[in-house]
Amino acid sequence: MTDENDNKDDLKEGVVDRIVSVFADVPPQKDIMIFADDVFAEVKVRLEEMAKTAKGAYYEDIFDERLERLKNLGCPAFIIKKLQTKKVEVISKACALNIPDNRDSLIPVISSHYLTIYSQLEMINFNGITGDTSLESSRITNALKKGLSQNEGKIFDGIYFMLDIDEGANTEKLTCAEADEKFKGKNRSPLTLEEIIALMLQKTEPPLSNLLAAGSRYEHDDEVPFLTTEDNKTFLKTCFYNTIHPNSVIPSCGARV
């Protein structure tokens, strides 16, 4: 620890020496403080540009990793190509958001219009065991679209990305109804079933909690689909919107692109 502190002190001293050497050549007729303000203003601009470039490269790597994961799971090539076309827009949006380190930044989502729920469940694979359900996909509806215009709701019918994903921190003891109210106050929204599946597709091992898709319904307004894990196998089941479900969380996201 002492060596580390000594190294930091040496670095600081080296930086200070270089800064002083720059100001040593300031013409005597110029105000050195005005000169310093100009220099530091330019440094600030350049550092901000460097930070933006680094941030973009960081999200670009994550974007590529997400698509590579889908490829390895057997996602159809035409879907990968469609997701690829969103790269610039998704990275730009991610850079504009202040996404905390404890949240996932971006995850690709495939609507059931492009790949059925059954096909997507089969892509979830832990130790060679794929997902399953006895539910009827035709009875699954998107509850979020009710509050959106037809144009806004189109995003759920396509291939898109969700950003700033919280996997349900502090929602363990909430009903879906209570979580909905909490999300609205923070300008966030619960995930649909396709989005919950998308979250699972990016995992290399089963989650510890059930994942409730509070943005979707199954047949009735009070019935919510969720993914659970039993003996390493993922199952799609349902629970109730106004009931606390044991060992469960309600994920949310901050944006969709």
Image: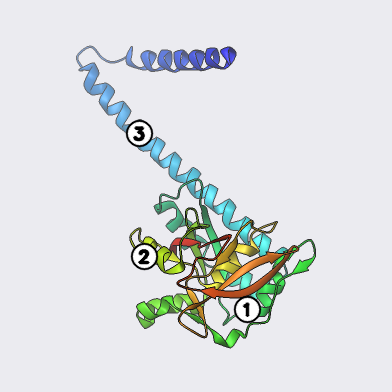
Please report the residue visible at 61 percent of the width from the left and 70 percent of the height from the top: 81
- Mark 1 vs mark 3: which is more N-terminal? 3
| Most foreground residue, 10 or 224 | 224
Q: Residue 234 lies in what quarter of the image?
A: bottom right
Q: Residue 69 lies in what quarter of the image?
A: bottom right
**Residue bearing mark 1:** 117
| Most foreground residue, 35 or 216 | 216
In the rendered image, which quarter contains the C terminus?
Answer: bottom left
Check if mark 3's residue and mark 2's residue have beta carbons within 8 Å.
no
Within-10-Å neighbours for mark 1: few <14, some 14–19, many 20+: many
The amino acid marked with disc number 2 is Glu
- Mark 1 vs mark 2: which is more N-terminal? 1
The amino acid marked with disc number 3 is Lys
Q: Please tell me whether residue 136 is drawn above or below residue 23 in the rendered image.
A: below
**Residue bearing mark 2:** 181
* Mark 1 or mark 3, whichever is nearer to me: 1
Please report the residue visible at 39 percent of the width from the left and 36 percent of the height from the top: 46
* Mark 3 or mark 2, whichever is nearer to me: 2
- Mark 3 vs mark 2: which is more N-terminal? 3
Q: Secondary structure at mark 1?
A: helix
- Tell whether 189 sits left or right of 38: right
Residue 84 seen in the current view: no
Residue 106 is situated, as x and y percent measured from the top left of the image, at 52, 58
Within-10-Å neighbours for mark 3: few <14, some 14–19, many 20+: few
Disc number for residue 44: 3
| Most foreground residue, 9 or 228 | 228
Q: Secondary structure at mark 3?
A: helix
In the rendered image, which quarter contains the N terminus?
Answer: top right
| Most foreground residue, 6 or 18 | 6
